[in-house]
Image (cartoon, rainbow, N blue to C red):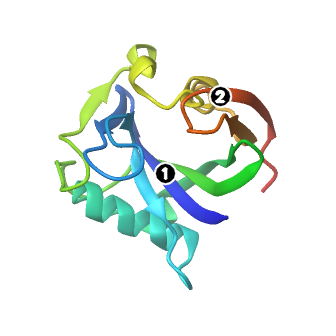
């Protein structure tokens, strides 16, 4: 089981999202993140991934943890994802090798039909202000969600 991060750049108008150009999740609209390297702190990984994928500089203290989601393929625990909101950064979000040009989506106009199926379950929860700990069970092949459950995040 790998630890990963995903960080959402948010402001009072909405959230920045981008199409993944290569690698796991290619073609999906998503946010910014990736694997935590051996010996790396989770927050440092989130900051590093944001820099690599958007060119933005974010201080670890500006990350607001909003969820921890465990993802499964059948019963195999694939990764534990630490989810952050970021509302303060330096620079302008830009396209990278891995991610297309970011677009700002209003919270009521998020393109869920172009995103991972479980995003439809957990993103509305965190965008409404809930902090959650969740489990998302996908069928083999990661196309369809079998089961989703959540509880309040206990820090």
Residue 51: give x, y in percent of width and height: 29, 64
Query: Observer-nearest residue: 14 or 71?
Result: 71
Q: Is 102 left, or right, of 6 in this rendering?
A: left
Query: Is residue 86 among what the camera can see?
Result: no
Q: Is 60 left, or right, of 26 in this rendering?
A: right
Residue 10: give x, y in percent of width and height: 40, 38
Query: Observer-nearest residue: 64 or 41?
Result: 41
Q: Is 108 left, or right, of 84 in this rendering?
A: left
The quadrant of the rendering that contains the C terminus is: bottom right
Query: Observer-nearest residue: 1 or 90?
Result: 1
- Lower position in the chain sequence, tag 1 or tag 2: 1
Q: Which residue is mark 2?
A: 145
Q: Is 69 left, or right, of 154 in this rendering?
A: left
Q: What residue is at 72 percent from the left and 42 percent from the top?
A: 74
The quadrant of the rendering that contains the N terminus is: bottom right
Label 2 secondary element = strand
Q: Badges 1 and 2: C-beta atoms under 8 Å apart?
A: no
Mark 2, other Cα within 10 Å: few <14 / some 14–19 / many ≥20 = some
Q: Which residue is mark 1?
A: 6
Q: Is residue 25 above or below residue 139?
A: below
């Amino acid at each position: 089981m790998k630890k990963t991060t995903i960080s959402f750049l948010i402001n009072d108008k909405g959230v920045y999202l981008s199409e993944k150009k290569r690698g796991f999740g290619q073609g999906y609209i998503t946010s910014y993140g990736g694997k935590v390297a051996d010996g790396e702190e989770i927050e440092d990984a989130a900051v590093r991934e944001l820099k690599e994928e958007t060119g933005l500089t974010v201080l670890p203290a500006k990350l607001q943890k909003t969820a921890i989601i465990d993802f499964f393929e059948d019963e195999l625990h694939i990764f534990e994802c630490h989810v952050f909101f970021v509302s303060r950064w330096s620079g302008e979000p830009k396209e990278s090798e891995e991610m297309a040009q970011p677009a700002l989506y209003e919270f009521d106009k998020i393109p869920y039909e172009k995103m991972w199926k479980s995003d439809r379950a957990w993103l509305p929860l965190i965008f409404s202000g809930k902090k959650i700990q969740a489990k998302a069970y996908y069928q083999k092949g990661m196309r369809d969600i079998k089961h989703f459950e959540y509880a309040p995040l206990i820090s």
